[in-house]
Amino acid sequence: MKRAIILSAAALAISCAASKSKTPALSHGYPINPVAFTSVKVDDAFWGQKLRASREVTIPLAFSKCEESGRYQNFVKATMPCDTFKVGGYPFDDTDVYKTIEGASYSLQTYPDKKLEAYIDSVLTLVGAAQEADGYLNTSYTMNPSHPHSWMSPTRWEKVENLSHEFYNLGHMVDGAVAHYQATGKRNFLDIAIRYADCVCREIGRGDNQLDRVPGHQIAEMALARLYLVTGDQKYLDQAKYFLDRRGHTSRKDAYSQAHKPVTEQDEAVGHAVRAVYMYAGMADVAALTGDTAYVNAIGRIWENIVGKKLYVTGGIGARHAGESFGDNYELPNASAYCETCAAIGHVYVNHRLFLLHGDGKYYDTLERTLYNGLISGQSIEGDRFFYPNPLESDGGYERQPWFGCACCPSNLSRFIPSLPGYVYAVDGRDVYVNLYMGNRATVDVAGKRVKLSQGGDYVWEGNPSVTIEENRAGRFALKLRIPGWARGEAVASDLYTFTDTNVTAPVVKVNGRPVEYQSIKGYMTIDREWKKGDRVDIAFDMTPRTIAANDKVEADRGRLAVQRGAVVYCAEWPDNDFDFKNAVVRQGQRFDAVRRGDKLGGITELATDVQVLGYDQEGRLTLSDRRLTMIPYYSWANRGGGKMAVWLPSEPQTTMLKK
């Protein structure tokens, strides 16, 4: 029945003009310009597999789950409200539809698909039909306004600072609509989002006949800033700033929702981690567009707090299951770590924006740590099973799930992974930043002139990326190539984690086969020259596996070490080790053998080393036995079923860890 609804809607879908808005393009306000996802085509062994899994598996799966779970049916029911409808699910279920359309739109830009485009149009027909006359659109309310979802009230916006998620729905709707518009040129989704945004702007504020409300769950702030850029309508930017400036001044004043004090006075990451990072990203957007330096200063303080005291070695954030929240400073437990996948995605958003504000590679170093470890760990290699939390240790209680009733993480992955091409490059005048290394072809605007670049090599496993100039109409410009912190001997931009050895082999950089000397300034080396077609830069990073120690204030990691090779953090897992590897002693500076395994876990480099394992003999006496420890990339764990896993391993025998 649900599929019939979709197919019939497709037949009735009204075609929309493909011409783009005549609104003049507005500056995003950031000093540095990101190169849009529409200008970068990724062709990379590592990321290509993940993009393909997203396109062929995750996005179709997410759409099918929207059908099976009644997400689409909710929009149909909202066209004929009835006081006997029992509203179930969650009041943010609509966002799974919006997020999946967003991800599919990113994918369409690189891989045009008429059937997929028609399917999206059919869904949007249902969405548009459910919109109320004044623009309001939230099926959990409209299906039965007299008895809406239990987290809501028969009065609109009454519980928006708590659980109704009405502004959260707006945020994801706008993000999906803008991506769809950018990818297809169609306005059908964009116009729906504009009508809902207009409804919010009319009814929420400090004017006469308005309600003074802020989002219970942030995201509308950065979405409204994005809508302002697309439409040029100042009221959307004003509304985003209003949401931020009124935080801590309305009825909601708790740390859980980052409303314990005005946003410009905050200096510590607290409360629900996803809400927090979405708010910080919105603060950066509004700061860039308005020039409000108080926002910038606050985000800077909070970033220092996260990277210095609340960041997991995998780049994950959010220590506590209770409230899905940040813990206290240095509270970073492993087995009970929450590290929600959505929080990792939001952390990428924040670090990307801070780079655009400051041009400092430390933000991309942090982004990369999260991206290669604590973010993609949330999705199976095949793209069909998921994690909500991402712990750093397990006794077998975690298994990837095909979906969740609260599906925010898998649907968030379906929208984030296809957007990855938009994080690779950036431009500032005649400076072209190469921020991520992956095979791709890109067209970049340098001072109004076209430059075409390509990347090759194998950054993830071999550490040998290359950048080639395919076309240059800009004359002289500077390539600013990021030298990652891990390649400079810096685990993170703080003393929270450090490499245990100080022997750092500097990257070797060659231009057209000739070595060049360079300095790393703010994490970038600069090559400024008159580039010609065919010019090529090759970089060789030292990929020696290295051990990492945590600050002694991190109680959970005292006397333990983690292992990293390149950008990838490793773990030990049960299928590779037939002994209790949690008692395997890894020494500082331990030597690891790196073996390429193209047939394993989608293709990985596996690490192996000799260790001693503390245990008991049959008579109860302590023993040390020699074993061979195998380690795999953390992101790839739990792809072979549930079982034991550990990122941090003891660096000396610890009898307190033994279970008799």
Image (tube, rainbow, N blue to C red):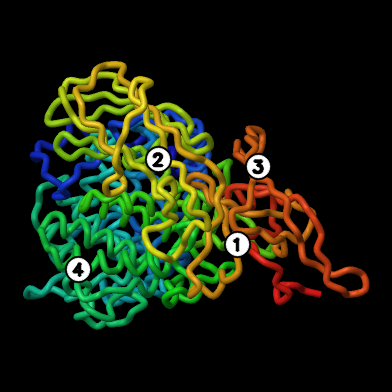
Residue 443 screen position, x and y as percent: 26, 27
Residue drawn at x 60%, y 65% is: 560
Q: In this view, does 263 lie to the left or right of 314?
A: left
Q: What residue type is labelled 4?
A: Phe
Mark 2, secondary structure of its residue: helix
Q: Distance between the residues labelled 4 and 1?
A: 41 Å
Mark toward the viewer: 4 or 3? 3
Q: Which of 353 and 70 is in front in this view?
A: 353
Mark toward the viewer: 1 or 3? 3
First in residue order: circle 2 vs circle 1: 2
Residue 588 screen position, x and y as percent: 60, 58
Mark toward the viewer: 4 or 1? 1
The residue where tag 1 is placed is: 648
Residue drawn at x 69%, y 61% is: 585
Q: Where on the picture, by quarter, is residue 238?
A: bottom left
Mark 4, secondary structure of its residue: helix
Q: What residue type is labelled 1?
A: Trp
- Number of the label disc, if any, that sits on residue 593: 3
Q: How far apart are marks 1 and 3 (CA)?
A: 18 Å
Q: What residue type is labelled 3?
A: Asp
